[in-house]
Image (spheres, helix red, strand yellow):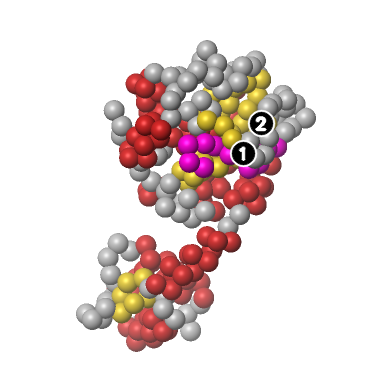
Amino acid sequence: MESPKKILEMVDYIVKNPTKVTVGEIAKRFGMSSSNAYKYMKILEDYGIVIKNPDKSYIPGFKLVEYGSIILKRINLRDIAHSHLVELMVKTNQTVHLVLKEGIWGIYIEKMESAESLPMISKIGMRMPLYSTGFGKAILAFLSEEELEEYLKKVKLEKRTKNTITERNEFLKELSKIRARGYSIDNEENEYGIKCIGAPVFNHEGKPIAAVSVSGSANKITDDWIKENSKHVMECARKISEKLGYAKSSFQTSKIK
């Protein structure tokens, strides 16, 4: 008998394969006889994991969709992110936020403060604009072209501080920079005296649904500090995204001019 690991590898291969697969292909890929490959494919078919086509090839079955729906209902982003946010707080010694995109707003769903954290107005449940915040710009930078255009039609870019970017072309250039480097910087654009680094959290479809950010005193968050700690913010966001089923090749970046 093949090991459970081998069977799971077979399912993973079938799901990720862009085309249908055959028994012969499975046998060759996993080093087994055609008869054994057929037996396992028959079991997977019986359980709805795969569907057998008229030409005797196989594609992923609808049972996987059912499983996915059940899993998504059980996912609690805050719980999934918790250990990674704690790790980020320890590494940076600053305030860490987890923010969920809800329409045109960002909603704080977690806030962790270190002993060196500067008091901030943020609190769990509070909503903030996306365009003026580090977490928000990190999300906006990775929206699809259509989603970003829709957002810009709905939202007026208004000054929250003298540093808030409100000119469309300048704002789009800023989002382009964020996409290129993988993280955003809030240079006192939402709150005076506070700087922030943000990185997007992607779901299983490659959509930016949330963001992780580290915030601190503008005097503390220097250019050198950002260079040193931006990697920690991106790593935290990546780990959370992976737990949500994110695959890097799946997301689309905005191309708005």
| Amino acid type for the residue under numbered disc 2 | Ser
Query: Which disc number belongs to residue 29?
Result: none
State how many labels appear. 2
**What's the residue at 74%, 32% (across, down)?**
114
**What's the residue at 63%, 28% (across, down)?**
215
The reply to whether the C-beta atoms of the residues labelled 1 and 2 are less than 8 Å apart is yes
Q: In this view, does 24 lie above or below 82?
A: below
Where in the figure is residue 153, as x and y percent of width and height?
Answer: 37, 32
Main SS of the magenta part reads strand
Instruction: Check disc 2: other Cα within 10 Å, few if <14, some if 14-19, many if 20+.
Output: some
**What's the residue at 61%, 54% (across, down)?**
76
Q: Is residue 84 above or below residue 14?
A: above
Q: In this view, does 158 lie above or below 179?
A: above
Q: Is residue 128 within the magenta segment?
A: no
Instruction: Check disc 1: other Cα within 10 Å, few if <14, some if 14-19, many if 20+.
Output: many
Q: Is residue 105 within the magenta segment?
A: yes
Residue 208 visible, this angle: yes
Instruction: Name the foreground residue: 29 vs 132.
Output: 132
Q: Most extreme residue toward the left, as rendered?
A: 55
Mark before the other along the chain sequence, 1 or 2: 1
Residue holding disc 2: 122
Q: Is residue 31 above or below residue 249?
A: below
**Element type at mark 1:** strand
Instruction: Name the foreground residue: 121 vs 8.
Output: 121
Where in the figure is residue 167, as x and y percent of width and height?
Answer: 39, 18
Where in the figure is residue 227, as x and y percent of width and height?
Answer: 54, 25
Residue 232 visible, this angle: no
Classify residue 18 by image quadrant: bottom left
Classify residue 28 by image quadrant: bottom left
**Element type at mark 2:** loop
Residue holding disc 1: 108
Q: In which quarter of the image is the C terminus?
A: top left
